[in-house]
Image (cartoon, rainbow, N blue to C red):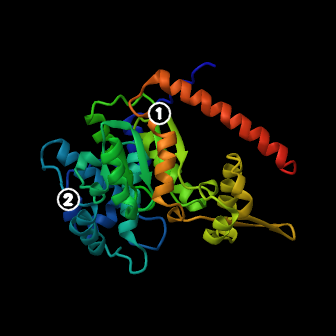
Amino acid sequence: MPRTKPKTLPSLAARLKKAGIRHFDELIHEQSEEWLIKNFPVHKDEYPVNVTRLMRNLLWQMKERIASNEKPPFKELLRTYWYMYVKPTLARAGALAEETDQYKQLSEHLAGLVRIYQVMKYKDIGFRDENEANRKVGLFANVIVFAEKVGHFAYLSELFEQYHVSVIALGGQPSVLNIEYFVDAIKAAKINLRRSFYLFGIVDFDPSGWIIRDAFVNNLRHYGIKNVQTFELVHPDMLKTPEEVIAARYPVKAGKEMEEKNRRWYEEVTKRHYAFMKYLVEESAGKRKLYGLESEAVSTERINLELERIMKPVIGGNEEKLKVYEMNNLDIANQELILFKATHPEIP
């Protein structure tokens, strides 16, 4: 199958223009209300200035000043930057909101400049990673055990010591900053990002948990880790009996805003052919009710046994051993699929 050529990015000037960013000789954060209103005009009446463009230009100007050695790297948290530069500027412009979380907007605009417009990186400014303590890069850096919740980090640290693999606790929706610095640490360990990476996930078995998992994988891909294979450590078959599954399950959040997310998740997990998935689905009057499992529903003892089975063969990158392992896995998967179809004729 022919390889598709990577998309060529538009020029930096084109990307900056699309983001509404331009160079200013004046220091934006020191300017008067009149200057800010003149240079960041709005098309609506919600604020006196275009808040999105103002935030993006403040960030870009800081990046420019650091790149030209006019200013040293910031070496502070993004929240510190918000209080020092952004909040006072918004207040002076009469654009400080009472109900909207504008710090969150700043974080999202910065992530957009990094991920979507690709005009800068977090390290260009030098922001500190507030989640730095919850990640470690091991000797086998391309083998990564990750968890949705910071509470799992003590357990991840045990795995780091035992297996010398990389570990990271995301603390919910993964921060692009956190993943940028995590990948930088992997590169510093002299790991070729083009090699195979094996991800073992401890996330809630529900749509939100899998969205977090997918965001983590997509962030890794953005930073050059493209060849990724994922393994789930929390799913219904990690519990041993139907009674355990039913006792541990909880209703997945429903409602109109969740319909599409729930549908996509159900389609995705159905492909795994988990034998106990049927205990997380109830059909009534033509409607489907879904249940999920917290990541804590599976004990670390059971996770240890699963890691012993599926992670040990990939540690060290022994390609011959890995090929044998993957062929055996494929054979087992085919047998399980045949058995599943034989015992579940109602499922296409």
Q: Is residue 162 left or right of residue 265?
A: left
Q: Amino acid at mark 2?
A: Glu
Label 1 environment density (alpha carbons within 10 Å; few <14, some 14–19, many ≥20): some
Depth check: give the residue in front, 170 or 138.
138
Looking at the image, is mark 1 or mark 2 earlier in the sequence? 2
Q: Is residue 241 above or below residue 215?
A: below
Per the rendering, the mark at residue 76 is: 2
Per the rendering, the mark at residue 275 is: none
Q: List x then y, in percent, for residue 334.
A: 72, 34
Residue denoted by label 1: 313
For image coordinates 78% across by 42% down, the residue present is 339
- Number of numbered callouts drawn: 2
Q: Can residue 134 be seen by looking at this rendering?
A: yes
For image coordinates 49% across by 69% down, the residue present is 44
Q: State the image quarter where residue 110 is shown.
A: bottom left
Q: Is residue 159 left or right of residue 314?
A: left
Label 2 environment density (alpha carbons within 10 Å; few <14, some 14–19, many ≥20): some
Q: Is residue 279 above or below residue 160?
A: below
Q: List x then y, in percent, for residue 264.
A: 68, 54
Depth check: give the residue in front, 161 or 16.
161
Task: Provide the secondary structure element on which disc 1 rests.
Answer: helix
